[in-house]
DNA sequence: AACTTATTGAAAATGAATTTCAATTTCCTT
DNA sequence: AAGGAAATTGAAATTCATTTTCAATAAGTT
C-alpha cells in the first residue's frame, strides 16, 4: 500500500537511480507539489503552483518532471474532452473512471467492481485483452443539474 | 431509422437551410465522402480522400465541413489517446464504446445494453445525469495478441 | 578536485486546430 | 435574369499546447 507522499517520493528516487537519472532540487519540489494535490492537473497548472514559491523553475522542467513521474508509474496521463493533458497521481486503488460536469468542469472519480468485471467480460467476447481503459461520463453534476 | 446516405444528406440540407447556411459543391462532396466511410476519420485523412478527386478543395473547408456535420448531429467528434480529433458518422444505434488495439491501431466499436444500464445506475448514485459518455479499452486485439 | 554525464530553462520548433481576409459563390429580391 | 447582401472558400497566418534544441549549469562518480 503506497499512501504516503514520502513513500511515493522514495519510489521515485529508486526509479531514478535505476534509470541513471539524477535527483535535483527542481524535481524534488515539483514532485512534492504534484503528489500533494490529489486532482487532475495540467502541466500549466502545476507550473503555476510551483513557480509561486520557486520563480527560478521553468515550465519545461515541470513538463519534463511530469513525464518522468508518468514513466516511473507515479502519475498517469489523461486527455479529457478539452484536449488538455492532465496528470493524476496513481493510487493503489486505481481510478480510471470519471464523471465530468459540462457546466462547472468538476471531475469526480469513481470505481465500480461490477463495471470492471463487465468490461473484462465484454472484451473477452471480442478476443481483446485490456491493458488500460477510459470511462468518462459527460453530463451535469448534482449541483449543476438544478 | 436513418440508414441511407441520401437520407442523411437530406437531413444535412434541412439543417443548413434552418441555420441559413448555404449548400455548396464542396460541402456536398465532403459530406458524401464522409458519410460513405463508416470509420473514425481525422480531418487530415478525409482531406486526402477528398482531394484525390477534387484538387481544388482545401483542407480548411474539409475541417469546417466536419464541424458543420458535428453541429448538425450527423457526426461526432472523438479524441483518442493519440490526441487526434476523429469524426464518426452518427448512426441510430449509437456506438460510444471502443476497443483500441495498441499494436495495429484498429478501432472496434461495440455496444452492450448491460453496460449502458450499469452506467446509468452508477451515475444516478452520484446524482449525476449523463449527456454523453466515452468508454475506451486500450489493449491487444485477437490478431495482435499472439 | 576533476571529469563525465544529466539537467536546466529560455527560446525555438512542432503540429493540429482555428482564424483571417480577399476573392468568389450562393441565393434571395426585384 | 440581373443585382446585391451575405456566406463560403482556400491559402496563409495564427494560436496554443506540447516537445525539442542547445549552451550553461549542476549532479554524482572516481
Image (cartoon, coloured by chain):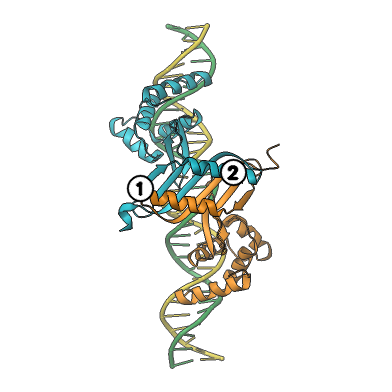
Chain colours: A cyan, B orange, C green, D yellow
According to the image, label 2 marks what residue?
A: A121
Q: Residue at x 53, y 52 (%)?
A: B114
Q: Nearer the viewer, residue A128 or B38?
A: A128
Q: Residues within 10 Å of mark 2 (few under 14, many from 20)?
A: few
Badge 1 element: loop
Please identify the quadrant where the C terminus of chain A is shown.
bottom left
Q: Chain of mark 2?
A: A
Q: Where B86 sits versus A56, above or below?
A: below
Write down the residue under mark 1: A106
Q: Residue at x 68, y 61 (%)?
A: B52
| Image coords of residue B140 (percent x, y) | 64, 40
Q: Nearer the viewer, residue A144 or A42?
A: A144
Q: Residue at x 51, y 57 (%)?
A: B77
Please tell me which of labels 2 and 1 falls first in the chain. Answer: 1
Between residues B73 and A132, which one lies in front from this camera angle?
Answer: A132
In the image, residue B10 above or below residue A140? below
Left or right: residue B57 compared with residue B142: left
The chain that hosts pointer 1 is A
Q: Is label 2 on the same chain as label 1?
A: yes
Residue B145, picture quadrant: top right
Amino acid at each position: 500500500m503506497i499512501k504516503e507522499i514520502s513513500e511515493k517520493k522514495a519510489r521515485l528516487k529508486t526509479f531514478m537511480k535505476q534509470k541513471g537519472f539524477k535527483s535535483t532540487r527542481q524535481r524534488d519540489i515539483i514532485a512534492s507539489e504534484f503528489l500533494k494535490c490529489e486532482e487532475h492537473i495540467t502541466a500549466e497548472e502545476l507550473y503555476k503552483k510551483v513557480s509561486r514559491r520557486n520563480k527560478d523553475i521553468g515550465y519545461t522542467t515541470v513538463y519534463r518532471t511530469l513525464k518522468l513521474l508518468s514513466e516511473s508509474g507515479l502519475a498517469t496521463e489523461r486527455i479529457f474532452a478539452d484536449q488538455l493533458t492532465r496528470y493524476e497521481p496513481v493510487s493503489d486503488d486505481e481510478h480510471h473512471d470519471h464523471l465530468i460536469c459540462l457546466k462547472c468542469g468538476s471531475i469526480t472519480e469513481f470505481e465500480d467492481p461490477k463495471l470492471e468485471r463487465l468490461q473484462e467480460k465484454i472484451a473477452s467476447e471480442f478476443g481483446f485483452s485490456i491493458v488500460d481503459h477510459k470511462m468518462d461520463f459527460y453530463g451535469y453534476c448534482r449541483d449543476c443539474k438544478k
